[in-house]
Amino acid sequence: MSRQITVADVARLAGTSTAVVSYVMNNGPRPVAAATRERVLAAAEELGYRPNRIARALRSRTTGVVGLVLADALNPYFGALAGHVEQALAGHGRLMLIGNAGYSGERQRHLVERFLDARVDGLVIASADAGR
């Protein structure tokens, strides 16, 4: 397995500082000249750089992830619901993780706990049992 490409690698290839690479990748907090931005993006592309979501989550205290717990992912209603939720979240730059409870209250509680342990930014529960 090859090593992960870092911000420092991109900065070295682009001939700039790691701070400038960070500004480009995060669209701020400081502006970057168009030519420099293009150099950084070209270097990132050439190296195959991918931002580290975990590091970003530690800094921002948000994960960009929302959990969706479905009563039964095989049920067409819940499948369609998942599609709509995912589309809405993607429009806001969020990633969705799905958990399938399989109509089990115990499994649903377990999934909720796992998502909360993973520090998701939000949690949607589509339960078939409104009484719980």
Image (tube, grey):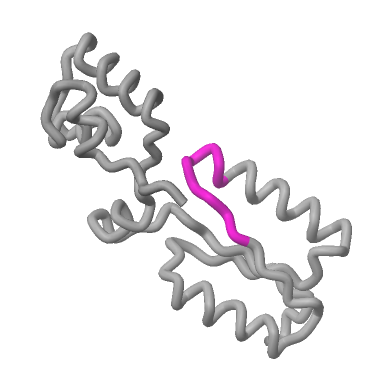
Residue 73 in which image quadrant: bottom right
Residue 47 in which image quadrant: top left
Furthest-top residue in this view: 35
Depth check, front residue: 42 or 55: 42
**Residue 14 rendering spot, x and y as whole percentages:** 21, 22
**Residue 30 rendering spot, x and y as whole percentages:** 13, 29
Depth check, front residue: 122 or 97: 97
Residue 114 falls within the magenta-colored stretch: no
**Residue 124 rendering spot, x and y as whole percentages:** 59, 65
Vertically, is 120 above or below 4? below
Depth check, front residue: 16 or 72: 16
Depth check, front residue: 9 or 60: 9
Vertically, is 35 above or below 48? above
Looking at the rendering, the stretch of residues picked out in magenta corresponds to 89-97
Which quadrant is the C terminus positioned in?
bottom right
Residue at 24% in and 39% down = 7
Furthest-bottom residue in this view: 106
Residue at 36% in and 48% down = 3
**Residue 119 rendering spot, x and y as whole percentages:** 41, 69
Total tally of numbered discs in the picture: 0
Residue at 22% in and 9% down = 35
Residue 27 in which image quadrant: top left
